Image (cartoon, grey):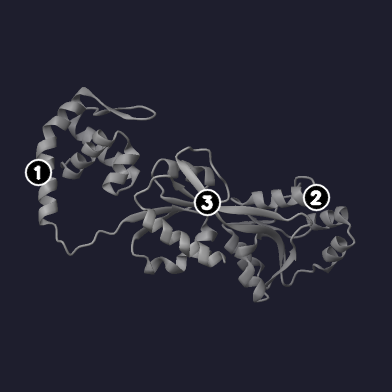
Amino acid sequence: MILNLEWFRTFKAIYETGTLSAAAQSLFISQPGVSLHLNSLEAYTGHKLFDRSARRMVPTERGKVLYNFILEPLSKLETAEQVFHKSSKTDRPTISVGMCFETFQYTLEEHIAHLPFNLIIQFGEYPRMQHDLDNGLLDLIITPQKGQQKNLEYRPFSKERIVLIAGNQTESETLESLLSSPKLTEAREWLKHQIWYSTAADMEHLKNFWVKNFGEHPDFKPNYIVPNISSIIRCLSDGKGFSIVPDFLCREAIAEGKIKLVWEGDSLLENTLYFGTRKKTMYAQEVSQLEAIFRDKWV
């Protein structure tokens, strides 16, 4: 194994900041990268350098000896780096953002090439995004859910309405007649026997809409489970079937006549969308620029 001097820089940052996430922020690298450097250095030295507790990385005796040994020479190398670094070179910060795939595709994708900073997009479940934001792995999340972490703050910026849509070849007149009567029980039973599309990650939309408007959990399974809501809209375009999705994702397809808005529900189901950030961040300017893109898109 060849010794990498970056391992020492990372070790010093962990020692001085006390946590992996704080070290990652100070070095402008990811937390997994910090962990990789530390693990590699411990493997190289053959000694455990920190005791890992829930809140802090506590240096071992070997860790203290190593820190005192490398502190002066590493500081000299960092000074040399600053002195001889080209002044004309501008470092690009890297911003990590968590959101659902459809939100990224609808809002941010077209702007990426023009951003003056590097961008890493993470998709996943909202509780995981909140955890990663709190631990410094993400700098901004777009979420309809607010967490309880004291280090995070949430600012509302828009709403999404969950609606029932259908392909434009779908016979929906029967349903519309039942809903206007209103005969909700008959409408509910009729819908159960239709073709349904959903995604594995967004069954919540179907469940919440069904409970709010019919007063019970849906007792049927969708016919087709596809990767994401964009796939649903493409499958329904000029076709047959039903799905329940956020309205902002299907406005364009509705305007083009590829799908149709069938029902918003007797009781509207709306989610507030939030910007989630840490209360203290070194990327406030970059985060504000991203937030402006989202606000402009949702106007």
Q: Pointer 2: residues within 10 angstroms few (<14), some, or many (20+)?
A: some
State the CA–CA distance, disc 1 to disc 2. 70 Å
**Sequence-earlier tag: 2 or 3:** 3
State the CA–CA distance, disc 2 to disc 3. 32 Å
**Sequence-earlier tag: 1 or 3:** 1
Dividing the picture into quadrants, the one containing residue 14 is: top left
Under mark 1, the amino acid is Lys
Q: Nearer the viewer, mark 1 or mark 2?
A: 1
Q: Pointer 1: residues within 10 angstroms few (<14), some, or many (20+)?
A: few
In this orientation, which residue lies closer to the viewer: 277 or 113?
277
Residue 161's spot in the image, x, y percent?
Answer: 66, 58
Q: Nearer the viewer, mark 1 or mark 3?
A: 3
Residue 188's spot in the image, x, y percent?
Answer: 82, 54
Which residue matches tag 2? 214
Label 3 secondary element: strand
State the CA–CA distance, disc 1 to disc 3. 43 Å
Which residue matches tag 1? 76
Question: Position of 68 compared to 204: left or right?
Answer: left
Dividing the picture into quadrants, the one containing residue 75 is: top left
Q: Nearer the viewer, mark 2 or mark 3?
A: 3
Residue drawn at point x = 10 percent, y = 37 percent:
72
Residue drawn at point x = 67 percent, y = 71 percent:
254
Question: Position of 102 compared to 132: left or right?
Answer: right
Which residue matches tag 3? 155
Q: Pointer 3: residues within 10 angstroms few (<14), some, or many (20+)?
A: few
Question: Position of 275 compared to 226: left or right?
Answer: left
